[in-house]
Each structure stands twice: as C-alpha cells, then as structure tokens.
Image (cartoon, rainbow, N blue to C red):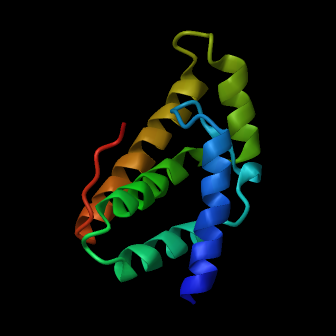
Amino acid sequence: MLAMATKVVTDYGRVLAQVQPGLQGVPESLLPHSRSQIRNAIVMLLQHLQPEHTVLRESLARGYVYLAQFVPDAEATVLEKSAAVPGHLPTMRLMNRIKLDMERALEELGAMGVHTVLK
C-alpha cells in the first residue's frame, strides 16, 4: 500500500513541478491520478511518516492543499479566458471556491496534526 501511495504522490509531484500553482485554476486533466487517489495517498504517507522528516511532511502538506487548485477543465478554461476581466462574476466565484477548498484542506491537515505554511 505504501509503495502505491508513494508512486501516486511521486507522479503528482512531477505534475506540480511543471505547473505554477495559483488561484487561477489548473486543468484537472493534468493530474496523473484522480484527486481522491492523490488525496488518500498523501494522507497515508503523512500518517506513516516519522516526525523528524519535517521537510517531507511540509512538502506533502503543500501538495495536499495545492490539489484544490486543480479544477475541471471547463472551469480552468473559464478562468484562463476571463482572468483579465476585472469583476467577472463567474471567475470570482470559481476563485473563491478554490480559496475555500484550500482553506478546507488546511483545516483537514490541522485536524490530522499537520500544520503548514504555504509559500
């Protein structure tokens, strides 16, 4: 189980290395596995990680939060096309949902005893 979780997280890490996380939304089709598979793999690794591995723990926590920025492709297209339009209501709603999902992810991590600071 841990080997599979490691593979899923490694694949996801490769994607994160190629995209610029931000509130603009990243197409979900770029993910190498489903969001739930990635989320579960990160949680499993966090649960089995020794406390002294703080850098790895922090990296996993960031990846967990950044997962919220991957949105359905149609929504990513809306965000991309309307990013330059100030006050565009659908864009603002999508961005606010991404922020809320990121906040929820931080709360979930906190409930697991994992605290992180996003850079």
Q: Residue at x 68, y 41 (%)?
A: 18
> Is 93 left, or right, of 90 in this rendering?
left
Q: Residue at x 28, y 45 (%)?
A: 117
- The percent coordinates of residue 100 (x first, y second) are 40, 44
| Front-most of residues 58 and 97 | 58
From this view, report whether residue 56 is shown above or below residue 87.
below
> Is 39 left, or right, of 35 in this rendering?
left
Q: Quadrant of residue 19?
A: top right
- The percent coordinates of residue 24 (x first, y second) are 58, 30
Q: Residue at x 35, y 57 (%)?
A: 55
From this view, report whether residue 62 is shown above or below residue 76.
below
> Is 88 left, or right, of 101 in this rendering?
right
- The percent coordinates of residue 94 (x first, y second) are 55, 35
- The percent coordinates of residue 93 (x first, y second) are 51, 32
From this view, report whether residue 83 is shown above or below residue 75.
above
Quadrant assignment for the N terminus: bottom right
Q: Quadrant of residue 32?
A: bottom right
